[in-house]
Image (cartoon, rainbow, N blue to C red):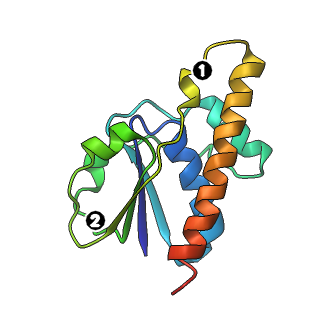
């Protein structure tokens, strides 16, 4: 099974989802993440995932065009912008959408920003665990 997580810049939300989907699905799925643009993996996303024992420090920020020829079983858009810009992929993969807030847009002290990253991480973790239970483990 192949899963793509798509976001605007492939820096925070899609990277966190990529990490959790790999964690929960294990070898049952190949997980990819990409952005409509590429902004690099956000160091705060790496840090908050490490707090939950998920290492995404080796991830790269990829453009969705790199994956146009892959027949994904599932394409998950994690922001409204990505849903609107999502290209058509080969095959008949199911599309899923959840608009998570972008923690990179939060202004304030470092503590306030990291708290926002943790809140979004928690939402993404729950979504990914549920997604794997519904769409990956049922096979």
Question: What is the x, y in percent for residue 6?
Answer: 40, 48
Q: Secondary structure at mark 2?
A: loop
Q: Position of residue 128 (x, y in %)?
A: 59, 60
1 lies left or right of 36: right
Q: Earlier in the sequence, mark 2 or mark 1?
A: 2
Q: Give me the residue at 26% from left, 42% from top.
A: 85
Q: Is residue 116 left or right of residue 88?
A: right
Q: Nearer the viewer, residue 137 or 99?
A: 99
Q: Indicate left or right for 82 with 117 as reference.
A: left
Residue positioned 54% across, 35% down in the render: 101
Element carrying mark 1: loop
Q: Quadrant of residue 118?
A: top right
Is residue 42 or residue 120 the one in the foreground? Answer: 120
- 95 shown above or below 43: below
Classify 71 as above or below 109. Answer: below
Residue of label 1: 106
Residue 6 left/right relative to 16? left
Q: Residue at x 38, y 36 (%)?
A: 8
Q: Nearer the viewer, residue 104 or 56?
A: 104
Alpha carbon separation for disc pair 2 and 1: 34 Å
Residue 84 figure quarter: top left
Whether 134 is drawn above or below 113: the answer is below
Counting from the top left corner in percent of width and height, residue 95 is at 35, 62
Residue 137 x, y percent position in the rendering: 58, 80
Quadrant housing the N terminus: bottom left
The residue under the point 55% across, 84% down is: 138
Name the residue beneath numbered marker 2.
Answer: 70
């Amino acid at each position: 099974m192949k899963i793509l997580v798509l976001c605007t810049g492939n820096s925070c939300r899609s990277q966190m989802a990529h990490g959790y989907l790999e964690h929960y699905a294990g070898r049952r799925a190949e997980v990819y993440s990409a952005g409509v643009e590429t902004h690099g993996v956000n160091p705060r996303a790496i840090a908050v995932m490490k707090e939950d024992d998920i290492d995404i420090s080796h991830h790269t920020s990829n453009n969705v065009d790199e994956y146009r020829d892959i027949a994904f079983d599932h394409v998950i858009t994690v922001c409204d912008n990505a849903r609107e810009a999502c290209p058509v992929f080969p095959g008949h993969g199911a599309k899923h959408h959840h608009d998570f807030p972008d923690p990179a847009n939060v202004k304030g002290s470092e503590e306030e920003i990291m708290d926002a990253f943790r809140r979004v991480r928690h939402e993404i973790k729950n979504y990914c665990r549920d997604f794997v239970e519904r769409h990956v483990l049922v096979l």
